[in-house]
């Protein structure tokens, strides 16, 4: 075996496949997505910013209001559950 020749492990085909894969990864890393859906979650900041500006369509609700409504709903379900248990014990 000649130690001076530089032969890639696996032969020429493996080297060509590695180069093609590296080129594909390089082009995929440099490409920008063409749509917000292709960009994934948080890919387009302009759509995220529209949620908190006057450009947004529909009902505008403060996040704190949503939090209080959700907690209030959970508390009401727990209270109704306790009331149902209590009335079942007293009237049966």
Image (spheres, rainbow, N blue to C red):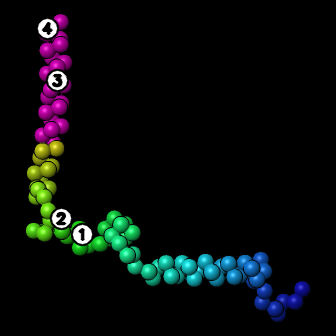
- Graded by Cα atoms within 10 Å as few (under 14), some (14 to 19) or many (20 or more), the crowding at tag 4 reads few
Residue 29 visible in the picture: yes
Q: Secondary structure at mark 1?
A: helix
Location of residue 63 with respect to 6 vertically, above or below: above
Q: Residue furthest right?
A: 1
Q: Which mark is residue 47?
A: 1
- Graded by Cα atoms within 10 Å as few (under 14), some (14 to 19) or many (20 or more), the crowding at tag 2 reads few
Judge whether residue 34 is colored magenta.
no
Q: Secondary structure at mark 2?
A: helix
Pointer 2 with pointer 1, Cβ within 8 A:
yes
Q: Nearer the viewer, mark 4 or mark 2?
A: 2
Q: Secondary structure at mark 3?
A: helix
Task: State the image coordinates of residue 13 (x, y, percent, origin top left).
Answer: 74, 79
Pointer 3 with pointer 1, Cβ within 8 A:
no
Judge whether residue 80 is colored magenta.
yes
Q: Which stretch is magenta?
A: 71-92
Q: CA distance from mark 3 to mark 2?
A: 38 Å
Q: Main secondary structure of the magenta part?
A: helix
- Please state, as top left, top right, bottom left or bottom right, where the N terminus lies in the image: bottom right
Q: Which mark is residue 51?
A: 2
Location of residue 49 with respect to 89 vertically, above or below: below
Q: CA distance from mark 2 to mark 1?
A: 7 Å
Residue bearing mark 3: 82
Q: Which mark is residue 91?
A: 4
Identify the residue at image location x=71%, y=81%.
15
């Amino acid at each position: 075996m000649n130690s001076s020749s530089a032969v890639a492990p696996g032969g020429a085909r493996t080297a060509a496949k590695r180069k093609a894969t590296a080129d594909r990864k390089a082009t995929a890393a440099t490409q920008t997505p063409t749509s917000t859906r292709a960009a994934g979650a948080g890919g387009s900041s302009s759509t995220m910013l529209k949620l908190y500006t006057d450009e947004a369509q529909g009902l505008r609700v403060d996040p704190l209001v949503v939090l209080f409504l959700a907690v209030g709903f959970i508390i009401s379900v727990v209270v109704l559950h306790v009331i149902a248990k209590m009335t079942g014990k007293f009237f049966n």
